[in-house]
């Protein structure tokens, strides 16, 4: 049996492949690919079992009575630079025996079919993503739910993973309105949309360049369609969300960008932007604002505003990297100008320096510092 209290120390110095796992006080996920190799693309069909004994503290590999899930999945390796690591991250969809997509609840999380097994190879504590998501949820803003688990693939132990909700539209995930190909006029055209700022890798990297440079004054920001995916969007929908972001950026470039009536305030959900800044700065996330950054827009009949989030990819945070000044507790990540590749969008920095947004940040910080973001509570979560 493995004790979770020793897991972090153990993983830092041992190779998971050398371990024979027979029991754990964490849920156990077992995947059998039947001799197939899991690759980046295409996905392969495999069998998966999830053992989660809710009655006792211990889960056993050979337990056939307490399956949280037993069925088919389609699985692939995920990530960009993380694909070179020996501990791979995976994304998978739950399937029926006929290989049809089916929603299931895994480890107590709301039913869905899209999931990520987050490896957290860079983060030897395995805590940085979990802590960031958990704190954001407690502040009242959606962030992907996640649960720790042990992973075994084809009988070989892979290590402790973080089973995480994939960012997608859904009632229990990013709660934007469903957008069909024929929603091309009126209120239905106005939402919902999810876009992201990230590296242009993977299958879903189509998008458009901003008219404005990022903080280096030279490079143009690239926005990517996330929901709907590019191939599932009508040209009118692509044009609409691009035009909305163009308008937002043009306002942020104007002298009256902070006007209460004609500035950014009517366009964005300021609370979600404030919460995003608080978690990003509290954690000093190296990738904040410039990579793995999501935005979503609701339909006009639902307010029509642009929201920041959900959070994603916070393993390079809390002082972990020893480069790009990421381990410093001085200054602000949102104002970073160091030569670290991708630069922050100009509008994040301009928001941060605006008196109205600054005052909002202070109010949210003072409120949550007494509860969710207090030293005592953060230590309790850890």
Image (tube, rainbow, N blue to C red):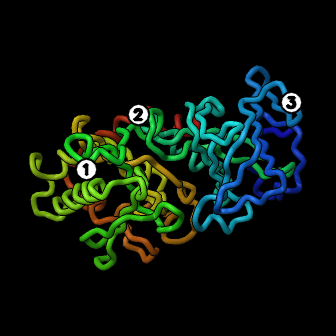
Q: Which mark is residue 178?
A: none
Q: Name the residue under label 1.
A: 358
Residue at the image position 53 percent from the left and 57 percent from the top = 317
Contact between marks 3 and 1 (CB within 8 A): the answer is: no
Mark 3 element type: loop
Check disc 3: other Cα within 10 Å, few if <14, some if 14-19, many if 20+.
Answer: few
Q: What crowding class fits label 1: few (fewer than 14 Cα within 10 Å), some (14-19), or many (20 or more)?
A: some
**Mark 2 touches mark 1? (CB < 8 Å):** no
**Mark 3 vs mark 2, CA separation in Å:** 37 Å
Which residue is under mark 2? Answer: 140
Tell me the residue at 22%/58% (across/down): 243
Disc 2 to disc 1, C-alpha distance = 20 Å
Q: Nearer the viewer, mark 3 or mark 2?
A: 3
Q: Where is residue 147 in the image (x, y as percent from the top left)?
A: 63, 38
Q: Along the polypeptide, which appears first: circle 3 or circle 1? A: 3
Which numbered disc, 2 or 1, marks the residue that appears first in the sequence? 2
Comparing 220 with 12, the one in front is: 220
Q: Nearer the viewer, residue 320 or 291?
A: 291
User: Helix or strand or loop: what does disc 1 sit on?
Assistant: helix
Q: Specify whether residue 10 is in view.
A: no
Q: Distance between the residues labelled 3 and 1?
A: 54 Å
Position above or below: 221 against 257: below
What is the number of the mark on residue 63? 3
Q: Quadrant of the N terminus?
A: top right
Spot the residue most to the bottom. Answer: 218
Q: Where is residue 230 in the image (x, y as percent from the top left)?
A: 41, 58
Check disc 2: other Cα within 10 Å, few if <14, some if 14-19, many if 20+: few
**Residue for point 37% across, 64% down:** 207
The image quadrant where one finds the C terminus is top right
């Amino acid at each position: 049996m493995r004790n979770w209290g020793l897991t972090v120390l153990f993983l830092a110095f041992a190779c998971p492949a050398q371990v024979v796992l027979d029991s754990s006080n964490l849920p156990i996920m077992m995947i059998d690919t039947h001799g197939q190799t899991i690759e980046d693309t295409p996905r392969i069909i495999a069998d998966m079992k999830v053992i989660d004994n809710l009655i006792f503290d211990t889960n056993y590999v050979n337990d056939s009575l307490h399956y949280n899930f037993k069925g088919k999945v389609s699985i692939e390796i995920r990530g960009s630079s993380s694909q070179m690591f020996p501990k791979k991250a995976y994304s998978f969809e739950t399937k029926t025996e006929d290989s049809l997509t089916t929603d299931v609840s895994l480890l107590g999380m709301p039913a869905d079919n899209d999931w990520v097994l987050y490896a957290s190879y860079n983060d030897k504590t395995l805590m940085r993503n979990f802590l960031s998501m958990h704190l954001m949820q407690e502040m009242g803003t959606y962030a992907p739910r996640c649960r720790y688990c042990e992973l075994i693939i084809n009988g070989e132990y892979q290590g402790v993973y973080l089973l995480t909700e994939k960012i997608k539209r859904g009632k229990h995930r990013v709660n934007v309105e469903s957008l069909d190909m024929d929603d091309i006029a009126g209120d239905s055209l106005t939402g919902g949309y999810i876009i992201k700022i990230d590296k242009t890798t993977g299958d879903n990297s189509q998008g458009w360049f901003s008219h404005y440079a990022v903080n280096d004054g030279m490079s143009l920001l690239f926005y990517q369609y996330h929901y709907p995916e590019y191939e599932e969007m009508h040209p009118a929908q692509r044009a609409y969300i691009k035009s909305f972001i163009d308008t937002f950026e043009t306002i942020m470039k104007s002298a009256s960008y902070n006007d209460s009536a004609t500035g950014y305030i009517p366009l964005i959900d300021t609370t979600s932007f404030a919460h995003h800044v608080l978690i990003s700065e509290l954690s000093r996330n190296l990738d904040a604002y410039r990579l793995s950054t999501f935005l979503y827009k609701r339909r006009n009949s639902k307010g029509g505003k642009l929201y920041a989030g959900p959070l994603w990819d916070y393993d390079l945070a809390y002082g972990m990297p020893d480069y790009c000044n990421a381990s410093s507790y001085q200054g602000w990540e949102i104002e970073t100008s160091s030569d670290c590749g991708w630069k922050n969008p100009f509008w994040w920095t301009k928001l941060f320096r605006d008196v109205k947004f600054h005052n909002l940040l202070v109010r949210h910080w003072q409120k949550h510092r007494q509860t969710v973001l207090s030293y005592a509570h953060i230590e309790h979560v850890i």
